[in-house]
Image (cartoon, rainbow, N blue to C red):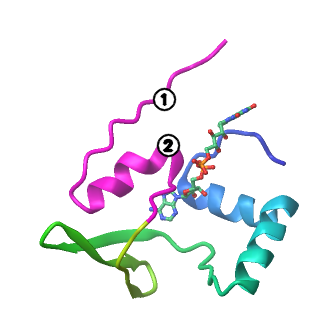
Amino acid sequence: MNRSVPESPEQQLSESADDPITAALQERARADGARFRHDTAVVGIETARGRVRSVRTSEETLPADDVVLAAGIWGPAVAALAGGRLPLVPVAHP
Ligand SMILES: Cc1cc2nc3c(=O)[nH]c(=O)nc-3n(C[C@H](O)[C@H](O)[C@H](O)COP(=O)(O)OP(=O)(O)OC[C@H]3O[C@@H](n4cnc5c(N)ncnc54)[C@H](O)[C@@H]3O)c2cc1C
């Protein structure tokens, strides 16, 4: 696994798709009906009356009743797309 610091979400997206453990998890999820969009950025999250209605990617808009935010250190930027504030800060460890 490449453990260099990714410079952007786009870089990390393409690297994780090559990881064998990630690939095995994706295969299992696909068998259960999940669909993946690789190298596709979430660029907008539409809300109405305090609830998420859809997620806009660089390619399409996907209707959504619920959204799991799993953007790691980029979480605050993605939460902001829905008007949310995620108080996440990077902290260096020894
Ligand atoms: C150099 C380094 C070494 C580390 N070593 C360790 C270690 O030894 N042990 C340990 O426990 N932890 C370690 N960590 C921390 C660990 O990598 C993170 O805690 C973990 O990856 C977080 O997982 P995550 O799934 O929450 O987020 P991530 O793995 O960061 O995944 C977030 C994903 O969201 C994607 N994303 C972001 N924005 C968007 C967007 N707008 N649209 C679409 N996708 C988006 C990114 O591309 C990324 O694929 C290390 C981290 C680094 C950088």
Q: Which residues are magenta?
A: 68-94
SS under mark 1: loop
The residue most toward the top is 94
Say few, some or many: other residues with alpha carbon within 10 Å of mark 2 (under 14 / 14 to 19 / 20 or more). few
Say few, some or many: other residues with alpha carbon within 10 Å of mark 1 (under 14 / 14 to 19 / 20 or more). few
Q: Which quarter of the picture shows residue 94?
A: top right
Residue sitting at x 74%, y 66%: 17
Is residue 33 one of those drawn in magenta? no
User: Which numbered tag is attached to residue 90?
Assistant: 1
28 or 47: nearer the viewer = 28
Q: Say above or below: 60 vs 26.
A: below
Is residue 92 one of those drawn in magenta? yes
User: Which numbered tag is attached to residue 43?
Assistant: none
The residue most toward the right is 20
Q: Is residue 19 left or right of residue 30?
A: right
Q: Which residue is identified by label 2? A: 73
Q: Which quarter of the picture shows residue 24?
A: bottom right
Question: Circles 1 and 2: CB distance less than 8 Å?
Answer: yes
Q: Is residue 63 left or right of residue 2?
A: left
22 or 5: nearer the viewer = 22
| Amino acid type indicated by mark 2 | Ile
SS under mark 2: helix
Instruction: Determine if the C-beta at disc 2 is less than 8 A from ligand 1.
Output: yes
Q: Say above or below: 28 vs 90.
A: below
Q: Which quarter of the picture shows residue 15?
A: bottom right
| Amino acid type indicated by mark 1 | Pro
The picture places residue 76, in percent across and down from the top left corner, at: 36, 46
Residue sitting at x 52%, y 47%: 72
Which circle's residue, 1 or 2, is located before the other in the chain?
2
The picture places residue 27, in percent across and down from the top left corner, at: 79, 77
Q: Main secondary structure of the magenta part?
A: loop
